[in-house]
Amino acid sequence: MGRENNDDFFSKVVRAGKRTYFFDIKSTKGNDLYITMTESKKTSEFGKENFEKHKIFLYKEDFEKFQEGLEEVIKKIKEIKSTLNSNNDVFFFESSSEQIEI
């Protein structure tokens, strides 16, 4: 089937500013497909460059619910942005140790 690794089917790299996202389709030993989503961010600590990575595994039984949730959140972000007043109000949501500006 032309796969590089026995369990890798497809990879998509998305470069977004200081972060890079990897979306990979893999298979289990039972040939069920699942998705790994990895966020990679270059960091510099003590003069040495490293990559900080966070990974989510999404299994087939959760695809539909995950998609519904993601679409709902993106829709809500668009609604919030459209209702911001002309004072350029900014909302911050905490996500682990980072703030996400909307």
Image: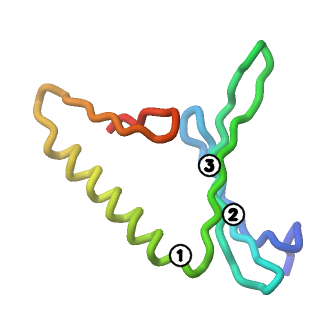
Residue occupying the point 41% across, 62% down:
70
Q: Which mark is residue 21?
A: 3
Cα distance in 3D space between marks 3 and 2 = 10 Å
Residue 35, by quadrant, is bottom right
With 62 as the anchor, is 71 left or right in this view?
Answer: left
* Earlier sequence position, callout 1 versus callout 3: 3
Q: Which mark is residue 92?
A: none
Q: Amino acid at mark 3?
A: Tyr
Cα distance in 3D space between marks 1 and 3 = 20 Å
Q: Amino acid at mark 2?
A: Asp
With 59 as the anchor, is 98 left or right in this view?
Answer: left
Which residue was labeled with disc 1?
62
Residue 86 image offset from top left, x and y in percent: 11, 30
Cα distance in 3D space between marks 1 and 2 = 16 Å
Q: Amino acid at mark 1?
A: Asp
Residue 25 image offset from top left, x and y in percent: 69, 69
If the image is split into quadrants, where does the C terminus sit? top left
Which residue was labeled with disc 2?
24
Residue occupying the point 26% across, 51% down:
78
Q: Is residue 41 above or below residue 67?
A: above
Residue occupying the point 46% across, 41% down:
95
Q: Nearer the viewer, mark 1 or mark 3?
A: 1
Residue 3 image offset from top left, x and y in percent: 85, 72
Q: Is residue 85 above or below residue 49?
A: below
